[in-house]
Amino acid sequence: MTAADGERELLRRTVEDLLARHCTPARVAAAAAGAGWDAGLWQALEETGLTLAGSPEEAGGSGGDLSAAADIAVAAGAAAAPVPLAETLAAGMLLSRAGLAIPSGPLTVAVASGPGLRRVPYGRLATTVAAGSGRSGGYGGSGGSGRDGDWLGVIEPAGRGGTDRGGTDRGGTGRNLAGEPRDEVIFGGDAEVHDVPAGTADYARRLLRLFRSLLIAGAAQRALDLTVTYVQEREQFGRPLARFPTVQQELARMAGEVALIGAATQAAVAADLPGAGEGVSAVVAAKAQASSGAGVVAAIAHQLHGAIGTTEEHRLRLTTTRLWSWRDEDGSEAECFAELGRAALAAATGAGAGAGAGAGAGAGAGGLWPWLSGSPAAGSAV
C-alpha cells in the first residue's frame, strides 16, 4: 500500500466512524420528520474539515482532490446523512474552479434551466450556488462586466433555523420521498452574481450528476450489506434464508447491480473532470448506470427483507427512499441514456466536432470506437 493509499483509507475510516456515530436510524428519521437536516451532524463534519475536501485551501477549502471528495460522498450516501454534504463538496469545487471564495456554512448547487431554480437540494437551509448561461434562471446575465455568458450566483439563505422560511430569496418549499428538502430558490436583490469562464454551467451540471451518482453508490452498497446480514440471521423452515437457492440468486443479482454502479462511478472519478469535453461521457454513463441500478437494488432488498424493511425505524427504509429519490435527480436513467445515445451517434457520424456541451461534446473527432474505448483521439473519456 502506498502512502497515498494509506491516507485515503484513513480518510474513509474517519468519515465512516463519524457518520456511524451521528447517523443512527432514529436521528435520520427525526431529521426527515422535522427540520430536514441534522445540525449537530453538520457541525461535527464542519469541525473536521470534511465539508470542503477537494477544494484548494487558498479558496477556503480543505485541500485534497476529487477522489477524497468522492469517498466522502459515498460514505454520506451509505449513512443516509441528512445534511447537504455532497452538495457542499460540489459547490466548493465549482466556486474554486471559477476563482471565487467559498462561503462558510452548508452550500448547495443548482443549474438554471428556465425561470427560477426549482427543487434545489436543501435550498431553504444552505447558501445556493446557482450556475447558468445568458438569461436562464430569471437572471439577465449582466453581472460584473455585462457579458452575456456563463455566470454563478451566490444566494445566501435568510437564516439557518431549520424551518421553512419565506423571504425575498426563497420561494416554495418541498421534500423528496426521503424527506430531504427540495426547494424553490429565487434571485433576490442581495444575490451576488459573477461572470465566470465559459463552460462553468456545464461543469456544474456534471458535478451534480457525479456526486448524485456517488451518493447512490454508497446507498446501494449499504442496502446490499443490510440485506446480506438479514438473510444470514433470519431463519425460515429451520435454516437461514441465505441458504435458499432463490434467495442466493436474488442476492447475486443485487450484488451485480451494486458492482456495476461502483465501477461506473469510480470510472467517472478517474476521468477527473479536467475540463469541458473531457470526462463528460463517463459522468453521464455513471449517472445512467446508478439510476438504472438503484430501483433494482431497492426492490430486491425489500423483497428479501419482507414487511420489516418498510417500518419507520428500520434503516433499510431510510436507504431505499433515498435510492428511489436520487435516481431521478440530476438526470434520470432515460435522460442520461438518451444523452449517451446522441453522443454515440455524433461520434459515428462525425457530427460531434463543435457540438454543444454534453456527453457528445467533441465526440465526433475520432469516430465511434475511440469514443467507446476512451482513447485520446475521442476527446472524451468513457
Image: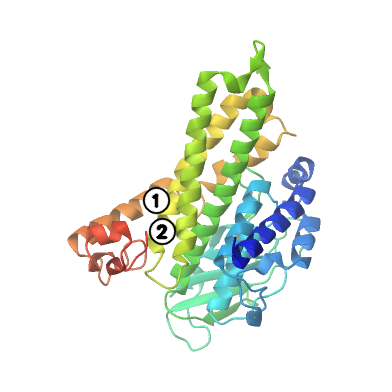
For the residue marked with disc 2, what is the amino acid? Ala
- Please, is residue 184 above or below residue 153 in the view? above
Q: Is residue 300 left or right of residue 79?
A: left
Residue behind mark 2: 282
Q: Dot 1, how many residues are within 10 Å of its Cα: few (below 14), some (14-19), or many (20+)?
A: some
Residue behind mark 1: 335
**Residue 144 seen anywhere in this rendered image of the structure:** yes
The foreground one among 104 and 366 is 366
Q: Of marks 1 and 2, which one's residue comes earlier in the chain?
A: 2
**Residue 114 seen anywhere in this rendered image of the structure:** no
Q: Residue at x 78, y 67 (%)?
A: 47
Q: Position of residue 41 (x, y in %)?
A: 77, 56
For the residue marked with disc 1, what is the amino acid? Glu
- Please, is residue 362 above or below residue 238 in the view? below
Check contact, mark 1 vs mark 2: CB within 8 A.
no
Quadrant into which the N terminus falls:
bottom right
The foreground one among 354 and 120 is 354
Q: How is the image coloured?
A: rainbow
Furthest residue to the left?
349
Q: Residue at x 75, y 66 (%)?
A: 46
Quadrant into which the C terminus falls:
bottom left
Q: Position of residue 213 (x, y in %)?
A: 52, 53
Q: Dot 2, how many residues are within 10 Å of its Cα: few (below 14), some (14-19), or many (20+)?
A: many
**To which quarter of the image does residue 50 belong?**
bottom right
Q: Residue at x 55, y 69 (%)?
A: 130
Furthest residue to the front?
1
- Please, is residue 252 above or below residue 67 in the view? above
The foreground one among 122 and 11 is 11
Q: Position of residue 156 (x, y in %)?
A: 68, 71
**To which quarter of the image does residue 127 belong?**
bottom right
